[in-house]
Image (cartoon, rainbow, N blue to C red):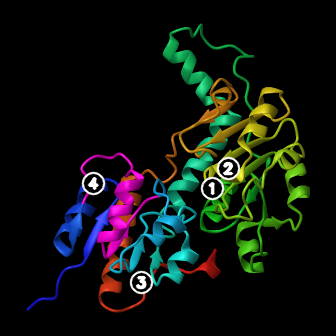
Amino acid sequence: MPSERLSVVVTRRLPDAVERRMQELFDVTLREDDSPMSRSELTQAVQQADILVPTLTDRIDSTLIAQAGDRLKLIANYGAGVDHIDVQTARQHGILVSNTPGVAAEDTADMAMALILGVTRRIPEGLAIMQSGDWQGWSPTALLGGRVAGRRLGILGLGRIGQAVARRASAFGMQIHYHNRRRLRPEIEEELEATYWESLDQMVARMDVISINCPHTPSTFHLMNARRLKLMKPDAVIVNTSRGEVIDENALTRMLRAGEIAGAGLDVYENGTDVNPRLRELNNVVLLPHMGSATVEGRLEMGEKVILNIKTFDDGHRPPDQVVPAML
């Protein structure tokens, strides 16, 4: 007789092809609409499932994990970031955690570059004029932005995504600088023509553009706080395609309103969908609804990784993308 199929609960709607494949392989409970699960629904899911497939909108904290049933053995996250999952507590309860790393690097880097161009070349302001019907024709002094070629780009977190950003920015003629917890190998620095800064403060004070590409961890929360933001040059801009919590959003808003920072491009926000309303009023800010990894190709690859992690676990092996506390 065939072995009993794994019980899998998926917390959000996934691409149709991913959901169909999961239905073929597992006893899967899919989400009927695309709203996030409530706390009570998440509690029910962890109590009944062998495998939970959450996304970044689900808070899998120690309290929820403590309520998990004996069946739950794997949290197969749909996404690379796991700051919404208490990996340490899961491990203590014998629950493995996996993610989908590397899939979104190129897509997110595309968006980071789009934000850099959008802010420095004032693209949203141009769009607004065209959509309003108020364009009066070309003018030598209208919507003057800044040339990106020759500007210093400071990348905070030169991992997969940061390196992809560096390659794109270099093609635009930007000078690449970076700060990491650990300096990269010389051959990677040489390939990217990247200058390492041991002091984040010193790098921030000298850059024309700052790109946030580090994960959100306890050590990176408000890494760009009010004091560090004040080190930025008045004509500098900052873009964030990583996690909103890395920047003190209220401090950033105050400085943008005061003209102490020239502009910002944000795809992520400190409080999720609760975006500072004063931030939305500024014309030197480009705001996007967390679109960094939103490509058809990327979402399908993420689903494939989730399925591979579950299948490998079901076969009695360690999931290829297992996350352990030491990695965080």
Labels 2 and 4: the sequence-earlier one: 4
Q: Which residue is mark 2?
A: 172
Q: Which residue is mark 3?
A: 319
> What percent of the width, then of the height, locates residue 312?
34, 85
Within 10 angstroms of label 4, few (less than 14), some, or many (20 or more) residues? some
Labels 3 and 4: the sequence-earlier one: 4
Determine the image quadrant of residue 260: top right
Can see residue 170? yes
Q: Which residue is mark 4?
A: 31
> What percent of the width, then of the height, locates residue 5?
19, 80
Range covered by the magenta-colored residues: 30-55
Q: Residue at x 49, y 17 (%)?
A: 131
Mark 2 touches mark 4? (CB < 8 Å): no
Q: Secondary structure at mark 4?
A: loop
Within 10 angstroms of label 3, few (less than 14), some, or many (20 or more) residues? many
Mark 3 touches mark 1? (CB < 8 Å): no
Query: Label 1 is placed on what type of residue?
Result: Arg
Labels 1 and 4: the sequence-earlier one: 4
Q: Secondary structure at mark 2?
A: loop
Query: Label 4 is placed on what type of residue?
Result: Arg
Q: Measure the C-alpha gap from mark 2 to mark 4.
A: 42 Å
Q: Quadrant of the C terminus?
A: bottom right
Mark 1 touches mark 2? (CB < 8 Å): yes
